[in-house]
Amino acid sequence: MNERNRAIFLDRDGVINEEMNYLSNPDDFKFIKGSIEALKILKHKGYFLILITNQAGIARGYFSLETLNSIHQKMNDILAENDIFFDDIFFCPHHPDFTGDCECRKPKPGMLLQAKAKHGIKLVESFMVGDTLNDIQAGYNAHCKTVLVLSGYGLEEKERINNIMPDFIHENLLEFAKSI
Ligand SMILES: [Mg+2]
Ligand SMILES: [Zn+2]
């Protein structure tokens, strides 16, 4: 496939919405201040917006696929009111202790590679944005540029950086969006 599309790959919890530790109720989905504006800016700059989220709460039995879908429906409804849409959503419902190994769970790059194959994404011109080192590792493994945001778990995770440095560190998604 001709790879011509640039993407911003976005972790969900702690980047788009407030980290809730296994968010399992649509009522608890709260956008982080500035994240909707950030998505608008990134879309206007011509990037595909692709959500890349580990949802091991499904493997653990904390919530169902239906619940995850209703959380994403709520998210998408609010975004639509703001004229903004994710181009795609990829989630990993697995956890090695419950469902065995998979190729999609971050820090593996499987979801990014699926997105590349589906949408013709040029990975080296794309960014993976997340609040944990697993996100950074996944982006690195896929040869994307990587961005650690300090929302969610980001502040704690910044202290744990050792072998793989994120290419960029920003206070939150909005600050990143303004920077590129
Ligand atoms: Mg996160
Ligand atoms: Zn998986």
Image: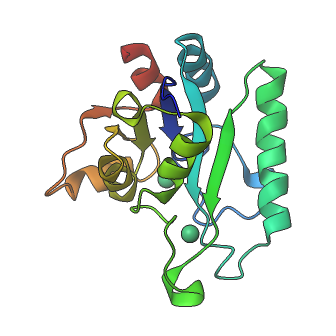
Give left or right: position of 27 versus 88: right
Horizontal and vertical percent position of residue 43: 60, 18
**28 vs 114, nearest the viewer:** 114
Q: Quadrant of ligand 2?
A: bottom right
Give left or right: position of 74 versus 104: right
Residue furthest to the left in view is 163
**Location of residue 62 with respect to 7 vertically, above or below:** below
**Location of residue 133 with respect to 147 vertically, above or below:** below
**15 vs 87, nearest the viewer:** 87
Q: Is residue 19 visible?
A: no
The C terminus sits in image quarter: top left
Q: How many marks?
A: 0
When asked about the image quadrant of residue 178, the answer is: top left
Horizontal and vertical percent position of residue 29: 72, 48
Q: Residue at x 27, y 32 (%)?
A: 168
When asked about the image quadrant of residue 86, the answer is: top right
Give left or right: position of 84 versus 56: right
Horizontal and vertical percent position of residue 69: 81, 56
**Location of residue 128 with respect to 37 vertically, above or below:** below
